[in-house]
Image (cartoon, rainbow, N blue to C red):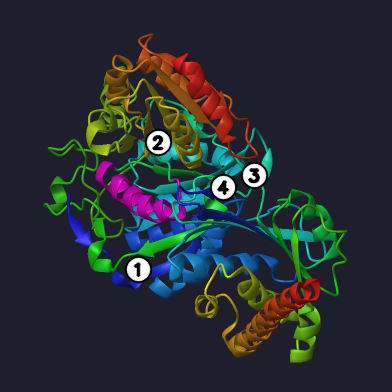
Amino acid sequence: MKKVKADPKGVLTGVHYLDGDFAIAEGALAAGCRFFGGYPITPSTETAERFSARIPKVGGVFIQMEDELGSIAALIGAVWGGVKAMTVTSGPGFSLMQENIGLACMMETPLVIANVQRGGPSTGLPTLAGQQDIMQARWGSHGDYEVIALAPDSPQECFDLTIEAFNLAEIYRVPTFIMTDECVGHMHEKVVIPPAEEIEVVERKWYAGPKEEYLPYKLDKDGIPFMIKAGDGYRFHTTGLTHDERGYPVINAECQDWCVRHLCDKIRKNADKIIRLEEDEIDTAEVVVLSYGITSRVATRAVQKARQEGIKVGTLRLITVWPFPEKRIRELASLVGSFVVPEINYGQIVYEVERCAAGQAKVIHVPHCGGWVHNPDDIYNAIKEAVK
Amino acid sequence: MIINSTGELTMTEIRFSGFGGQGIIRCGLITGKALALYDNKHATMNQSFGPEARGSACSSQLVVSDDRVLYPYITKPEILVSMSQEAYDKYEPELREDGLLIIDKDLVKPNPPRGKIKIYAVPATRFAEELGNRIIANLVMLGFFTAVTKLVKPESMKKALPGLVPDRFLELNIKAFDKGYEYGLQTLEEEKTGATKAKAKKK
């Protein structure tokens, strides 16, 4: 993996007052994103708007596509053309993107997609928050594959994690998601953008060997194949069909086994390197509040109240939602009495927690169907119930 | 409202309200930026995203704290700024009994005082028109707000303006802010002398 310093052209160094949507665009530009293709949808439109104003000034391209299907297709083309690319959307647009997200996974195309989640299903709540697309991020497209998804809890983290998303996408050649929500997307807070020389950016894993030996899907020592840029004179083929190392279709069970295992294992086997968690007072905890995104901020309010009453409560915030921190949850399940899982949906990540807890710890879900954040008292009550 | 162990107010909730087109969202942005960037506070600004359009009630909300803002929305604001009757009618009931109500004198007719609510009024729109453009009424209001709440430094507010108001109107916006600020100081002064006079009369 080759790390370089960010190109100062894209870095708006300074202290700003930005909303999460704008911060995503700035994070992408700092990470070297030079292509944006998207279709505007509330509450993510501000990201597209910011790109349209800023990306031409740093030598990049903004295209308002005809729809979300085309958006991902354009991104795949741009990436194989040699640039870093992203798009942004919300629930209904995310659904439309799924088919080509599968194609990007199969072609091992590094790209970044931000989903500023709103309440669903369908058109749902265009202007109000939700965390209801978390499972869709994992397996919204058909077939077996793994992705990476990050959940920022503030405009500052929208900036920071967008850079990280681009880096992870390049390292593992996988679509990487920023799963934020309307609340964080539209929330204005202080955002510090560091100087370019303090921002580390992962370069694409370019192939530099002899042209006649290039095989687009031959795994390198680290399990990730090299990429080339279309037009640089390399002969290559890529497809959505099950393929061998040459990138040509091979339609049989053996090749399928190799292909699918590779797509999944490159993430699963590196999960420890990818996953980032934030833990607080977890060593002495009887109950652990597990949350992600905006919900973890609201949950902290409840945790503070419970701690004032002497309840031993720890917190675990998923900065990385996918891959899921299975190992850590299994470990904790044998150490703590219960998990409290608030999320702005009617039950998604809680099933992952239950699966990993495997009956060793009690799991209490605190659902919210979307449209607002939790009342901290609902989380507080669940903590009380957990220690009863 | 969160009060720390030494009895200081460590969190304040503010709602700016008026009708779409008055620069209400801008009020939240300018104040939030001033507090977060120049006054060393945590300030989280949210605006209402609904079917609001030019002419209907609209608002922005700001949570200000010494520590990180955890709950991003206001629940029971200490300060309500209203620049239209409709917005006042809609949001007044949520204001705390000991809250601060700041209104445009000519555009809002408040109900008889509720609880210990303190009312400050400024003819923001009229002043703006006198300065040549009613579009800067929000800046007159912000100047007045800065003086009577003492929540944010006036220099910080002015520092926050570039980037949030068009460059060519920066000077006019500052003028509007100063006008409102002076009127605010004057209001406080009158309040003080009024109180002294009342006291003297009592004696």
Q: How far apart are marks 3 and 1 (CA)?
A: 30 Å
User: Could you tell me residue A353's position as x and y percent?
Assistant: 41, 21
Residue A330 falls in image quadrant: top left
Task: Look at mark 4 in the image and give the residue it sits on.
Answer: A183
Magenta-colored span: A153-172
Relative to A143, is B33 above or below? below
| Residue furthest to the top | A359
Same subunit, labels 1 and 2: the answer reads yes
Relative to B199, is A211 above or below? above
Q: How far apart are marks 1 and 2 (CA)?
A: 35 Å
| Residue A164 seen in this snapshot | yes
Q: Are marks 2 and 3 in contact (CB under 8 Å)?
A: no
Task: Look at mark 3 in the image and give the residue it sits on.
Answer: A128
> Which numbered disc, 3 or 1, marks the residue that appears first in the sequence?
1
Nearer the observer, A161 or A265: A161
Task: Look at mark 2 in the image and give the residue it sits on.
Answer: A240
